[in-house]
Image (tube, helix red, strand yellow):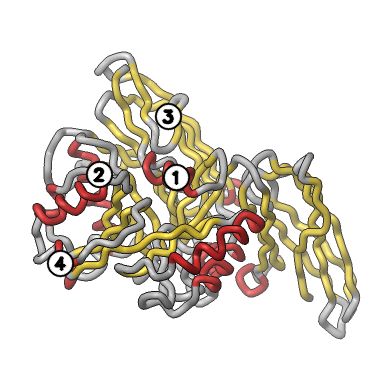
Amino acid sequence: MKIELVERLRNDTEKNVMLQLIITGTSHEAENKVVCVQSPMHSEPFCFSEIIINNLKKDEIQRLDLMYKFESGGRYVFYIWEKGSKLQTLKSAVVNMKGAGVYSGNTHSHSTYSDGKSTLEENRKAMMECGHSFIYATDHNTTAHYAELEEYEKKGIDENFLHIPGWEFTTKYGHSIAYGRNETVDVAKIPERNNLKAWQEFVNEMNATNAIVYMAHPYEAPRYEFGDNVLCGIKGIVGVETWNGYNYHALAYQNRKSFEIWDSFNRRGDRHYYGNAVSDAHTRNGQSSPYIKGYMNTLSKQAVEAMLKEGTYIGSNGPEIEFSLGDVGIGETCRIHSGEFQKILMKINVFDPLGEIEMVNVYRGFVDGEYTVKPNTKKIFEFYPIGELEKRNFVKNLYVDVTAGEFYRVEVVTGVGVVAYMADVKRLEKGFAFTNPIWIDMI
C-alpha cells in the first residue's frame, strides 16, 4: 500500500486548508490496513487519527479529504504512516501559513562557499521540506555568499522563507557567531587559547555594532576550544550553542558539557544567557536538525534576531514544548512580591508527533554570583508519561514554591527525533527538546 498526504484546497482568509489522503493498493491480494494521521500543534483539530482501509486491491485508489484550520502562521507538518510499520512507511506533508505564529529554523549552517558540501539552494530547499521557515548561512570567515543570498530575497517573500546572511568567526582557539554583523573580523585577533582579553575585545567590538554574540560549540573538539578562562570570564555575549548537532546528539558528553557551561553563565547573575540549538550542518540532509522554534509577530530577519536576543524559543529535533510560570513564558521573567517563597503555577505541555515521549525533566538553578565552570542547577522533577495519550501529548500543571534569583528550564527525551529522521533516515536518534529558562525576580 502506498500512502500520500497532499494539500488540495485552501482559504487563506478563513485560514482553512483541505488535505487529501491518497491510498493506493500495491499488493495482488486485497489489503486491510490502518493509516495513522497526526496533525500538528496549533491546528484545529489537533488530533491523532486512525483510518481503516478495507479490501484495497492492486492499483485501486481511495481518497479521503481532511479539513483543518490554523489560527496562526507558521510551517505546519503532518505525519502519516501505516500502523505497525511506523518508521518504514513514515511520510510528511507541510502546510505553509503566513502571519504571526510559531516559526522554526537553523541559525548555523555551511555551504560550498566554505567547507560545506551542499549549495545555498539545496540548504534552503531541505529546510522547507522539513517544515522550517528560516536559515542563517554562516560560512567560515567569509561574506562571499551574500551576493547569492540577495537573489533569494524576492523568492523568499513568495515562499514565506528567510535565508539570512551571516558568518562564523572561526579561529584556532574557539568559534563564535555574531548575528546581525555583516563584516568579518581578522582571526588573528585571537592569538592563543585561554586569551580572555582578546575574546572580550572581539565581543565588545560586536556589541558596539549591536551584533548578537553566541559562543559556538564550546566543547566540540579539544583542538579549538576557547579554554576555561574565556568561558568563565567572558562578558557581553547573549548565549552559547548548548546543542550543536554537527557531530553529536544533545545527550552526548560534548553537548552536556555545553549545557553545564550555559547553566554556569546563568549562575553569575550579570545577565540572562540563552542556549541555542543549531545543526552546524555541512550537507543538505543535516540542515534541518536540530533547530530553534518560537513565536514571532512576523516572519522577518528582525523578528528572528529579536528571538535570539530575548531567548523566547526552544531547541529540538522533533518534540515540542510549551512552558510557563505564572503568566510568563520561555525566556521571560516571572516577578514576585518578595524574596520569600511563593507558590506559582507551572504549566508544561509536551507534544511528540510519533507518540513516544519517554521523559520530561524540570531543572532549577540559582543565581549566586559565582564564576565557575560548575553549575548549581538541579533536576527537581522527573515525569515518565504512561499510556498512549500521555506519550503523545503530556500535560502537567502544578504549583511550585519559587523565590527570587531562581531560573527554571525543561528538557524532553522521546523515542525518535522525527524531524532529524525525515531529513535523513540514517539519522535514527533519540528525540530531544529543551527550553530556555524562565527567571524569578522581585517586582
Q: Residue shown at 29%/62% (left/top)?
A: 184
- The one of 289 and 46 positioned closer to us in this rendering: 289
Spatial CA distance of label 2 from label 1 is 25 Å
Instruction: Report the amino acid beneath label 1.
Output: Tyr
Give the mark nearest the N terminus, 1 or 4: 4
Q: Which residue is mark 2?
A: 208
Q: Are marks 3 and 1 in contact (CB under 8 Å)?
A: no
Give the mark nearest the N terminus, 2 or 4: 4
Task: Residue 354: tell me if it is visible.
Answer: no
Instruction: Point out residue 155 in the picture as x, y percentages from the top left corner.
Output: 62, 61
Crowding at label 3, few (<14), some or many (≥20) Cα neighbours within 10 Å? many
Label 2 element class: helix
Q: Which marked residue is nearer to the observer: mark 4 or mark 3? A: 4
Spatial CA distance of label 1 from label 4 is 34 Å
Give the mark nearest the N terminus, 2 or 3: 2
Q: Residue shown at 43%/60% (left/top)?
A: 165
The C terminus, quarter of image: top left
Give the mark nearest the N terminus, 2 or 1: 2
- Outermost residue on the top side: it is 337
Instruction: Report the amino acid beneath label 3.
Output: Leu
Q: Are marks 1 and 4 in contact (CB under 8 Å)?
A: no
Q: Residue shown at 64%/68% (left/top)?
A: 86
Crowding at label 2, few (<14), some or many (≥20) Cα neighbours within 10 Å? few
In the rendering, which numbered label is found on residue 313? Answer: 1
Instruction: Point out residue 352 in the picture as x, y percentages from the top left corner.
Output: 56, 53
Relative to 48, is 272 above or below?
A: above
- The one of 50 and 173 positioned closer to us in this rendering: 173
Q: Which residue is mark 3?
A: 325
Q: Is residue 379 left or right of residue 317?
A: left
Label 3 element class: strand
